[in-house]
Structures are given as structure tokens and as C-alpha cells.
Image (cartoon, rainbow, N blue to C red):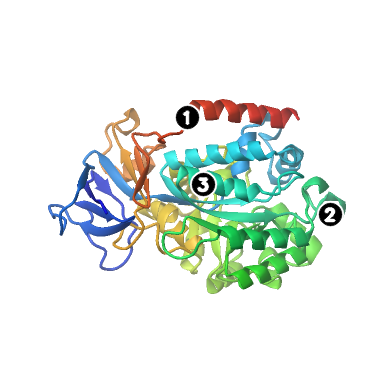
Amino acid sequence: MTRLWIKNPLGVFTADDTPDAPDASGGLVVENAVITEVLARGAEPSAPVEEVFDASQHVLTPGLINTHHHFYQTLTRAWGLVADAELFPWLTGLYPVWARLTPRALELATTVALAELLLSGCTTAADHHYVFPPGLDEAIDIQVSAVRRLGLRATLTRGSMTLGQDDGGLPPQSVVQPLDTILEDSARLVRTYHETGPGAQVQIALAPCSPFSVTTDAMRESARLATELDVRLHTHLAETLDEEDFCRERFGMRTVDYLESVGWLTDRTWLGHGIHFDDEEISRLGEAGTAVAHCPTSNMRLASGIARVLELEDAGVPVGLGVDGSASNDASTMVAEVRQALYLQRLRYGASVPVHRALAWGTRGSARVLGRDDVGVLAVGKQADLALWRLDELRFSGSHDPVAALVLCAADRADRVMVGGQWRVVDGRIPDLDVDALVAEHSAAARGLISG
């Protein structure tokens, strides 16, 4: 197999927090899809290499990892009717539009989201797809094909909604499915697509949407099935105070109590948003090993609140970053999410929150959230998933610390991105992807979805 030396980067962030983490200023050697050597400045590879990539003009980082997204929402960005709404009215305004989603529209939306993520340095992404109108039974199959075509890694979650407006939930009945249908399709997807072990490209998780859109039976049965199939669980939780009020009124308990009552307070679970937890709930989440996907831009866009990330981590909760849906972000730019996370947490805790800690949320922390130990860190034996960033744009002129500059000077596009030893972004472009044609067709689908 070809041995590649990514040589002498301008700056490097490895996300390796082990006590004996090696100096990586001399770069990395990649062979057979994994990192085989980490080199100090001036060191040479231990054996000959066939290729050398001169990284002296690049900052080297692990590939960023996105732990919460809704790919389909790229079709409903910046829609004026919900541009100034909080979560519940935002959802009720958009549900009827999303109910018109078609297979081709989903394919385009997924491709756009994945391409955006790749170009922003992301190599692994989790998507939460829970909208299954008639005719879209194979939504996750469509997403698997798009992931394989673009070459990222993905945790694709089989979402669901079982509590419609007729029964006191938020979604319209047209996107609510019978529980048996959901469980049967979930098992099919796991059997067909779920990969395990180091280097897995596609993984499947089970993801009832939220307390206000699924029944208690759906939560319990999903937890049972996830245990049986040994896959992860995902849902939205504690995103807004409205949700907390809903849980009190419908279930007679707060969100974490509800989570525990349905068998979800485990290390198999990761939660989207996780904003409104009290001290005791944070402690319980940490003891259980339940993870949180922090979505700073969406949380600000919808005025949902500021997650207590430092306290969650200090309690033992794995914390990663998510861009959330492209109708509440309204972008899929993972490196921008690192910057937003840093600044939002500084607003809560002060300016001493380190730049490197925010980068760790988007790499090592996000890998932990998705239950992976083979990505998110540049270290020997890890998958060769990495991003290379140039600092020759106007926005970086005058910067001094190359790693800090990525975050503080608002990097938005990687120059090169590698997944499993394969270049997926080269010179700021995705090879073999006609972006102009994709944008044209995707934009037309978006207009059609809104107009009905």
C-alpha cells in the first residue's frame, strides 16, 4: 500500500489528550487508511514513503465530526415565514412543508448537506431523519447511497414521529407512522447497513424525534430494540422551556426523569441540544454516560438558551458539536460551529475557555458522543480522517497562532480533506461533484417544496 507523509504542517492540533501524546509538528504517515506514525519536527519516517504532501502552508487537524443534523432541511433555509420564530411555532410552520418531501428532493438535500460538511472540514456526520410522508419509506436508504457516493462516514438515525396533532403532539398526522412500521424498518436498516469496528463508514441508530412528537411506547420500544441490535439511541431533549412544560403537563415529570422512565438514561444515548438541565440532572447524565450534542448556532437562532457545556463535561457527560438542521442554523459549516461554541461558552463562563477545548468538542468529544474511538484524534492506529487548512486568505492576514487563527479568524473552508486515507476534498473542491448543477437542481426542488 502507498505510504504518504503529510510533512511539516504550519500548525497542528491532534486532539490527543493522553499524557504521553507525541509531538506531531513533523507531520503524519498514512498507510492503508490509518495513521501509522506521528513525527516530531525534524524527524523522518521509519521506512521509505512513496508520496510526500508538503503541509508547510497548512494547519493540520483531525476531521471534524458533526453529531446532530437534519440533512433534509437544506431545502427550507432562511424561509421568511419562520425566520423570526422560536422552536414550537418554527416547527408548526415548517411541518406542512416538510410533509411534501419527495425521494429526489431528499437525495438532493442530503448531497448538499454532505458536500457543505466536507468542504468545512467534516469527515463524519450524524443525521436525524424523522420525516416519512407517504412515498418516502426508503429515506435512510437514499441517505446511505449519498454518503457512500461522497465518501464521508455517517451515523444515520432512523427517526420517527408517532404523536400527531390529533393526539396532542406537534406534527401533522400525515408524517406520523405506526410504531410497528417504525420498528420493522429500523431493524431492516440495521441488518442491511450497520457496520461495526474500526473504519466503519455507515452506522445506524434509532431516533424517536422528541417528547412532543412521539409516544412513550415508541421511546420504550426503541430502547428495547436498540439494546437487542446493539446500536445507539438519539433524540432531542431539553432544547426549550416549552418542551419542559410539555413534559410536565403530559408525563408529570421533567425531561431527565422522563428519559429514565423510558429506559434511555444510559451510555447508549446521545441527546440533541441538552440545554435546560439543572445541577442534579447534569450529575445523573454524567453518571449514566449519556452524551450531549451541543448545537450553538441553532440554539442562538431559535433563542432556545445556552447549554452548560463545561459543567456537563466536568460531570462526565461526553459533549460534541452539531450544526443541527439547515433550517435552524441555516448552514452546514462544521468549522463555524466550533467558533460559535467557543464564543457562546465564553459568554457563559468567561474568556478563559480555551480555543483548543472548542476544537476538542468538534473532534475527540464528538467521536465519543457517537461511540467511536477510531476517529477524532490524530494518533497512531486511528483512521486517517483529517483536514488541512490554508491561512492565505485576507481574513487571516496578521494572525500569529495558526491553530487559534482557524477559530478566531473564522475559517469556513478546508483546502484538503481526507477520509480513511482517501482525499475527498482537493484544492477546496470535491472531485467529480458538479456543484453548479447540484445547486441549480437543489434550489429548484426547494422552491417547489415551499410552493407546494
Residue plotted at (32% across, 28% down) = 394
Q: Do the residues under discs 3 and 1 have CB atoms within 8 angstroms?
A: no
Residue plotted at (69% across, 56% down) = 210
Q: CA distance from mark 3 to mark 1?
A: 16 Å
* Residue 147 circle label: 3
| Relative height, residue 125 to residue 79 (above, below) | below
Residue plotted at (65% across, 60% down) = 188
Residue 116 lies left or right of residue 59; in this view the side is right
- Identify which amino acid the numbered label 1 is placed on: Asp
Nearest the viewer among 217 and 244 is 217
Dot placed on the residue nearer the N-terminal end, 2 or 1: 2
Callout 1 environment at 10 Å: few (<14), some (14 to 19), or many (20+)? few
* Residue 168 circle label: 2
Nearest the viewer among 179 and 405 is 179
Q: Quadrant of residue 442?
A: top right
Q: CA distance from mark 2 to mark 3?
A: 36 Å
Nearer to us: label 2 or label 1:
1
Q: Do the residues under discs 2 and 1 have CB atoms within 8 angstroms?
A: no
Q: Position of residue 111 (x, y in %)?
A: 54, 39
- Identify which amino acid the numbered label 2 is placed on: Gly
Q: Position of residue 53 (x, y in %)?
A: 23, 43
- For mark 3, give the secondary structure: helix
Q: CA distance from mark 2 to mark 1?
A: 45 Å
Callout 3 environment at 10 Å: few (<14), some (14 to 19), or many (20+)? many
Dot placed on the residue nearer the N-terminal end, 3 or 1: 3
Which residue in the structure is indicated by mark 1?
434
